Amino acid sequence: MNRTELTQKLAAADFVLWDLHLYLDTHPDDLGAVAQYNNYYKQSRRLREEYESTCGKLTAMKAQGVEWLKNPWPWEKCGCDG
């Protein structure tokens, strides 16, 4: 998967996670929704790990020290072209 595909899939999974989070705030006993939340959480985590291993950190907060300042920039890494 390229960077664009990973970004779109991660954004979609995170959107569903947030929507389920809001739903579960008012329906905490809905076990089906809890199962869906857990599945999308795993999917989001897997996509985030794949993105960060091939394209670099998603946020500066995840970088160690000033790692995010060093070259190459995330969009310059091989295999991550859009």
Image: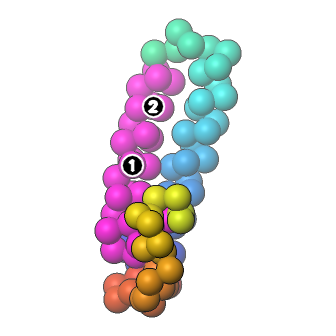
Q: Reading the chain from its start, which is encountered first: label 2 or label 1?
A: 2
Q: Nearer the viewer, residue 13 or 58?
A: 58
Mark 2, Cα crowd under 10 Å, few <14 / some 14-19 / many 20+, is some
| 7 to the left or right of 18 | left
Say whether residue 36 is magenta.
yes
Q: Secondary structure at mark 1?
A: helix
Q: Which residue is mark 1?
A: 45
Q: CA distance from mark 2 to mark 1?
A: 14 Å
Q: Nearer the viewer, residue 77 or 4?
A: 77
Q: Does residue 70 sit above or below 57 in this rendering?
A: below
Q: Does residue 44 sit above or below 73 in this rendering?
A: above
Q: Position of residue 18 (x, y in %)?
A: 61, 39
| 14 to the left or right of 32 | right
Q: Position of residue 66 (x, y in %)?
A: 47, 72
Q: Secondary structure at mark 2?
A: helix
Q: Cβ–Cβ below 8 Å for labels 2 and 1?
A: no
Instruction: Give the amino acid type for the residue marked by disc 1 in the picture.
Output: Arg
Tell me the magenta residue range.
32-58
- At x 36%, y 42%, the residue is 42
Q: Which residue is mark 2?
A: 36
Q: Nearer the viewer, mark 2 or mark 1?
A: 1
Say whether residue 51 is magenta.
yes
| 41 to the left or right of 19 | left
